[in-house]
Amino acid sequence: MEILAEAVKLFIGDKEILKGLDVHLRPKEFLGIIGPNGSGKSMFLKCLYRVQKPTAGTITLNGRALDELSYRESALQLSVVAQHNFYSFDFSVMEVVLMGRSPHKRLLDRDNAADYEIARRALRTVGMEECAERSFTSLSGGEQQRVILARALTQEAECMILDEPTNHLDIKYQLQIMDIVKGLDLTVVSAIHDLNIAALYCDRLIAIRKGRVVGLGTPRELLTEEFIHELYEVRAKVETAEDGRIYIRYLPQYLSD
């Protein structure tokens, strides 16, 4: 899956949220979107998965304009794992996961044996198969997020969009979710709050501030001490581990004066 966004703008009322973003997502790439709160990361992703419609600019999926596709057609190509997932009814885990088969169905089609097998396979992938009959609302936050990931897997889409999926999760579940996604061999684009998570899992990063792209590169290229200070207004030390990966230590103000 290749996604190309060109000169994407978004107004909410009279406020310009996105100010001409250009983003190129390559096939099988894990692209992370970083930036301060309110920078436009999630709003851009919402334009991709069609919760928001860009005011200007174009987005194409494998060369086809997104706004020329039906919602069903785009759902067959893009799956989404969002930050918050609320249900008004007490669905079972299996019922939630089977919702991912909806784009493959006609209006009154029932779930069949093949759908259940796909759903069970997705639950095995995320380590939640034994919870298939449990109530979704009875699960912990990390367990719920793994179920939502399983639902996305049942769509069998080429590209997965992660809209800050690990916010509010403890580090165990953050790493579980990202490990699973990294091993899927899909095209992935994710808004990421934690720069160490971004450095561990992303092939490239794109930095957004105030609705504009302000940086692009591999984690090692982009996440310099100078750039982190420019983007987030915090001091940090960027160090290299024995395996060659970088990690970031943030410095409190009293140590960086």
Image: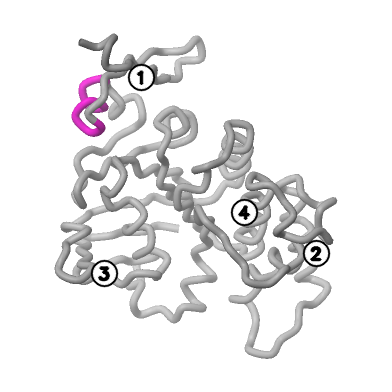
- The reply to whether dot 3 and dot 2 touch (C-beta < 8 Å) is no
Quadrant into which the C terminus falls: top left
Give the residue pinned by disc 1.
250
Mark 3 residue type: Pro
Measured as percent of width and height from the top left, residue 94 is found at 77, 64
Which kind of residue does numbered mark 2 sit on?
A: Glu
State which quadrant residue 53 falls in. Answer: bottom left
Q: Residues within 10 Å of mark 3 (few under 14, many from 20)?
A: many
Q: Sequence order check: which comes first, mark 4 or mark 3?
A: 3
Q: Is residue 67 above or below residue 48?
A: below
> Which residue is at a point 77% across and 49% down the rendered structure image?
128
How far apart are the two marked residues, 4 and 3, measured between alpha carbons? 26 Å
Q: Is residue 217 above or below residue 138?
A: above
| Picture residue at 46% right of the left edge, 78% below the top | 71
Magenta residues, start to end = 225-232
- Secondary structure category for the residue under label 2: helix
Q: Determine which residue is flagged by label 2.
A: 117
